[in-house]
């Protein structure tokens, strides 16, 4: 390594510390420790095109220890990405492209959002899986089209997180030979020495997972050692590689090697000392010397050449196999495919016909009651042949979630062209991996478990939403309707939790048609994840249900009775049929003057986006009484209803019809409550009060 | 092992399969495979008193693979617990004591609720930590008072879960020598062979964590081997032990060794075949032979003797040290302490005075603005000296969560008397371990991280609620108020998610007095967990705030202006001061006739429990306009307010005052919205419509 190399490394260290100092907030220690390893990676290995961060042939780099964000911003700036010195100076400021933790939708060159620990390395497993899958389907006719590495930088925090353990175990199982993880082994975490809480043998653990484990003894000073280790990582093609790089946190600072430099600025004097230690001019803030700039300028040309080479290979593939080449272009290049900013690719038009086919298969009065998880199975198996980007699996509940794509086979180390992933009992990593699959570009990943256990994956689901990852969550057994497994498995708070998380859709269809419509909404929604909440139990096909109306969130299913007093029952999923029954009974009261409207509301978030006039019309008009019925927490329903019927306790272990009975979700219990409510409305002159969703302030 | 031993083992196997058959639901495979190991454990090792399942000196047994519930019910029945044959026949039926998954609050002898995979083994780490802590503080004066083992049965599913990995790593770090885990190593999971997804070297992984790892080659037939392994586990006192017991799922059934016997009844014919394979009478369902009964009858006497021996030791301790003996009795024996059913022990009266002391330290107009996380630090450090049961720590954010108990030291392998646990970056295991600490009895555990990352621990938080574990969650940095760390760290959906989970309290205090009151509510609430949502940023001391009123959930803080038109602003935590500012501005409108009431609502769940009249009074009366202000999702607030001001998008990375500005949580943005709303109310004759919380149907 040359003096200039060291000058660049030290420039990275100092820039990062300066950013934190300017913001008076952030983490200088990790960037200063990780600068050598990441510099070697960017300079010697990482294939990228700074002028087109989404270039499909690029290697992927994930900074899993996202609090070291100043490091990646420094690197991106120096290596020619569209990130200016002004951007660096605006670190952690409102509207800047250099937020506190790296965000894929903000900063060019950031593949996935990190910061919540363990998410980056787990998403990286998804990135590496995507590469192996694409390689299996597109590396044909002697063209090696897809052939990139996935590199990750992690710290102690990530490696303590369960989600990372899950993902690492699966990565070893899948023999992801192109996944190379650099571990910032600095023996320090926020509370102090790792001796406080983390004394396991990390090397042995990763060997147990089936990884190659390498070490670099002096990660602060040994650039050649780092290079050799990464090269050895590349050479091992049947195992992921963990490179334990022994570093010093805050290297070069007064507090180096201690937790003091983890999460606080070094201070003006501290920074001056650091700059003098590294032989940089303390009088010049945010300064990059000319020779450093000159040395790195070549990466722009190099990037363009790499992209040109990829395009040549893509052309060669198309020349050998026109359809395959077109398909590879659609998914990999697309209209801006890839993790950075807003990835998207065009879907084959045929998918809508596949949905329509399922809808057309339903005959009112003929099609029997079917669980919506079963309907989901019908839909994904209609979609799978026409949507090759549909890839995913279950956390070891395939036979219950009914998510298997019959047109394909298992995705395994020996069969990477398969589209059915066996995630194992690893809900959190499953969701994080799907984020990574999506971030690679050209993928429409799905994952599956019981709805209740999306809670285990909350950290990753939140990032699906924040980072605009279109992941389809097939969540079955969506209520007390699962019956005997009992309250440990029966979601109560889950639906409202999901609805309150910005950026995603929560879809709870009521029958086969609505399930088809829910998939239509989910596949159409490119900006984030969709959760499909699906029943274990059979549900009747509803007269008046409409797959196209799912896109409106809620719609009038039908009316019972023809009286003058109007009441609207709004329900979702398995409770729509229950609402119909309640409506029938209410309307049938002898001498009654009721007209009972039933609204199906498969997605409150889509309903909220409808014009006010539509919302008013669907809910029966301003002031008209509305009752909600859903087998879950009533919290949240007051936006849409005056009387909210649901479950605000835990469920019970019993045959599901008995559980419904126990919690009062049966007509015998609901009808009197609605009647008491309507009596109150009558006493108030027929007005139930305006609803929040029918107001706009 | 005698023929009778095998008869008992086979009786357990058959009883379990019969329960599943009778319920036509459940999991026969694991009980049939695990019967030998658990029988040896119960017969040869486990110290218990079937007639007093909470006897303090007992060993703890956790069935982490909770879907094998029929197994523990069979064992409890046969070994003399208060679980009758009728109870077994009512497996998975409404109101039975034999629910689908074991529930500590339902079935005597069940220490912790299991079923959600990975929770049991993680809670068991907490149980073992409690034992080591109690041993350190009570095994004095030559009395070995506390000296129990914690045994766990786990399956492949638990070992794939991240939460279990986190807990196992920490258990190794803590050298929990009395934790012995039996691993049902049957090479099958729900989807099929473990080769599908789980090919890591489990033995090596646990060795990497610092565990002793032992094996039993034939767990179906080798009772002596099982016994020898458990004995070797006991002999290793400085490491937890994992015993890999190679078994056959559904041993003795036609589908043995396959996933087919995992989660479905064997069928009538299948059951007959099993019974004949084991030489039991196929004509006698739910039958236990006399010699089996006779062999196990002695466990009742044995249990009584074990309890008498414990009591003798407790008396000896009290004789040597009256205060220490009394304290041990208070915490360990209590009034029904221990995991099973509703654990509780009496708290020392002095804790209320400690709370009062913090309150008395606040002077209106003198005490400066203080972050509520800092107020929390004051309160727990006031409580800690008088509440020795307060034990816990942070997921590596001690300096940010401010949770360190200054009167104690670290809980570590070498210092188990310490009360500050270093959980590492393991949020999920942290919460699960706290469940275990509480289940041991006599403990008041707490855990800490940023509020946003309670999402990582959702699976365990839910079990705190369901299983009535009084765990205090100290969740700081509770909103966009954390500023620069950005949207990855800023909770939006978290508060409503917590409020929608039945069984817990979510407390968001506004200043020092309310923080003291929040702790008073949390310590008083013995039936479940409390989450304290605490600010990173400084908050002013509010005139009119009252620690005692926190117990009512919401209360009138004060009024601004004296006009005739009344509007109520309801806010929580950091937004109460904002509401005061908004109120001041609204009331100061020239020529205005407004009277603006500010309600502080630290806990909606407690407010919901107040009498209707109180709720009406606090919110200003039926029909009076109410506006809510909270820096989180507005979902849920329509129960309490007509206009809900909050954040329904993700936050941003910037200094926190700028983030507040960006999302419109500043007086300049809120005042016009409230004015527009009030104009609408005036147009409607002054009535804003009744609120759900002010109605009762
Ligand atoms: Ca570290
Ligand atoms: Ca198994």
Image (spheres, coloured by chain):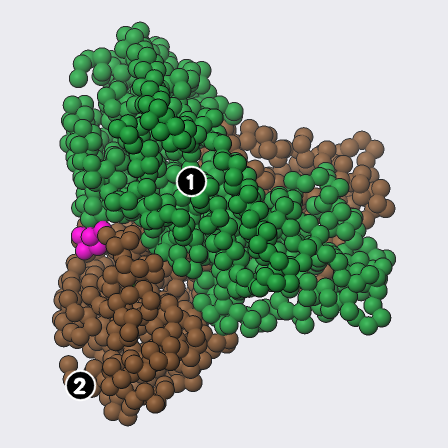
Chain colours: A brown, B green
Q: Residue A204 lies in magenta, yes or no?
A: yes
Q: Quadrant of the N terminus of chain B?
A: top left
Residue B388: assigned label: 1
Residue B317: mark:
none
Q: Is residue B350 visible?
A: yes
Q: Is residue A114 magenta?
A: no
* Residue neighbourhood size for the residue with mark 1, other residues' Cα within 10 Å, grouped as few (<14), some (14–19), many (≥20): some
Crowding at mark 2 (Cα within 10 Å: few <14, some 14-19, many 20+): few
Q: Nearer the viewer, residue A667 or B373?
A: B373
Above or below, A171 against A221 in this view is above
Q: Is residue B262 left or right of residue A558?
A: left
The secondary structure that dominates the magenta segment is: helix
The reply to whether discs 2 and 1 touch (Cβ–Cβ < 8 Å) is no
Q: Position of residue B664 (x, y in %)?
A: 62, 69
Can residue A168 be seen? no
Q: x, y percentage for residue A565? A: 81, 44
Q: Looking at the image, which residue is at 65% across and 47% down?
A: B549
The chain carrying label 1 is B
B556 or B527: nearer the eye? B556
Residue at the farthest bottom position: A290
Residue at the outermost top position: B290
Q: Quick one: quadrant of the C terminus of chain B?
A: top right
Q: Answer left or right for A663 relative to A19.
A: right
In the rendered image, the vertical position of residue B21 relative to residue A143, given as above or below: above
* Residue depicted at x 35% and y 80%: A269
Label 2, label 1: how many angstroms apart (C-alpha)? 59 Å
Q: Which residues are magenta?
A: A200-205
Residue A271 vertical placement versus B419 (above, below): below
Looking at the rendered structure, the secondary structure element under dot 2 is helix
Quarter of the figure with residue A609: bottom right
């Amino acid at each position: 390594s040359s003096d200039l190399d060291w000058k660049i490394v030290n420039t990275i260290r100092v820039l990062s510390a300066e950013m934190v100092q300017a913001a008076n907030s952030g983490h200088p220690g990790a960037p200063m420790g990780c600068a050598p390893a990441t510099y070697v990676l960017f300079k010697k290995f990482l294939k990228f095109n700074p002028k087109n961060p989404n270039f499909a042939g690029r290697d992927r780099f994930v900074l899993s220890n996202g609090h070291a964000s100043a490091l990646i911003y420094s690197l991106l700036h120096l290596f020619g990405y569209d990130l200016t010195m002004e951007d660096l100076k605006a670190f952690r400021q409102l509207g800047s492209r250099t937020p506190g933790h790296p965000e894929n939708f903000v900063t060019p060159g950031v593949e996935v959002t990190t910061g919540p620990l363990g998410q980056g390395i787990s998403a990286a497993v998804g990135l590496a899986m995507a590469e192996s899958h694409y390689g299996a389907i597109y590396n044909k006719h002697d063209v090696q089209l897809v052939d990139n590495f996935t590199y990750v930088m992690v710290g102690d925090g990530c490696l303590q997180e369960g989600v990372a353990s899950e993902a690492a175990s699966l990565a070893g199982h899948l023999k992801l030979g192109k996944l190379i993880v650099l571990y910032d082994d600095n023996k320090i975490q926020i509370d102090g020495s790792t001796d406080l809480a983390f004394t396991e043998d990390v090397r042995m653990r990763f060997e147990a997972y089936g990884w190659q484990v390498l070490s670099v003894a002096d990660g602060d000073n040994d650039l050649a050692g780092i290079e050799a280790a990464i090269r050895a990582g590349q050479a091992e093609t049947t195992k992921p590689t963990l490179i334990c790089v022994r570093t010093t946190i805050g290297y070069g600072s007064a507090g180096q090697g201690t937790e003091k430099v983890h999460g606080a600025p070094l201070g003006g004097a501290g920074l001056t000392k650091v700059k003098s230690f590294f032989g940089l001019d303390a009088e010049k803030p945010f300064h990059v010397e000319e020779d450093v700039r000159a040395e790195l300028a070549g990466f722009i040309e190099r990037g363009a050449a790499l992209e040109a080479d990829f395009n040549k290979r893509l052309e060669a593939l198309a020349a050998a196999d026109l359809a395959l080449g077109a398909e590879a272009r659609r998914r990999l290049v697309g209209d801006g495919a890839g993790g950075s900013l807003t990835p998207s690719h065009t879907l084959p038009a045929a998918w809508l016909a596949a949905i329509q086919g399922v809808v057309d298969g339903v005959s009112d009065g003929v099609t029997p009651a079917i669980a919506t998880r079963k309907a989901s199975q019908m839909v994904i198996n209609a979609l799978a042949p026409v949507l090759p980007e549909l890839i995913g699996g279950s956390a070891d509940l395939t036979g219950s979630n009914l998510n298997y794509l019959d047109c394909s086979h298992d995705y395994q180390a020996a069969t990477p062209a398969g589209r059915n992933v066996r995630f194992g009992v690893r809900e959190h990593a499953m969701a994080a991996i799907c984020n990574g699959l999506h971030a690679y570009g050209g993928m429409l990943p799905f994952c599956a478990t019981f709805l209740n256990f999306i809670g285990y994956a909350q950290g990753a689901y939140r990032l699906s939403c924040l980072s605009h990852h279109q992941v389809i969550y097939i969540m079955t057994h969506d209520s007390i309707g699962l019956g005997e497994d009992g309250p440990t498995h029966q979601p109560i708070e889950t639906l409202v939790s999901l609805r309150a998380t910005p950026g995603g859709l929560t879809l709870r269809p009521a029958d086969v048609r609505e399930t088809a419509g829910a998939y239509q909404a989910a596949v159409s929604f490119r900006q984030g994840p969709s959760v499909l909440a699906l029943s274990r139990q059979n549900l009747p096909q509803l007269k008046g249900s409409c797959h196209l109306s799912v896109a409106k969130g809620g719609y009038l299913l039908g009316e019972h009775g023809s009286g003058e007093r109007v009441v609207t029952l709004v329900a979702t999923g398995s409770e729509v049929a229950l609402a119909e029954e309640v409506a029938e009974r209410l309307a049938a009261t002898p001498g009654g003057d009721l007209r009972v409207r039933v609204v199906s509301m498969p997605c409150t978030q889509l309903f909220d986006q409808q014009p006010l006039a539509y919302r008013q019309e669907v809910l029966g008009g301003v002031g008209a009484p509305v009752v909600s019925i859903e087998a879950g927490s009533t919290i949240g329903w007051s936006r849409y209803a005056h009387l909210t019927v649901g479950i605000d306790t835990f469920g019970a272990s019993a045959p599901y019809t008995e559980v419904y009975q126990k919690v009062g979700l049966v007509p015998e219990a609901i009808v009197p409550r609605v009647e008491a409510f309507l009596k109150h409305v009558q006493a108030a002159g027929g007005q139930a009060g305006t609803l929040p969703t029918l107001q706009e302030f």
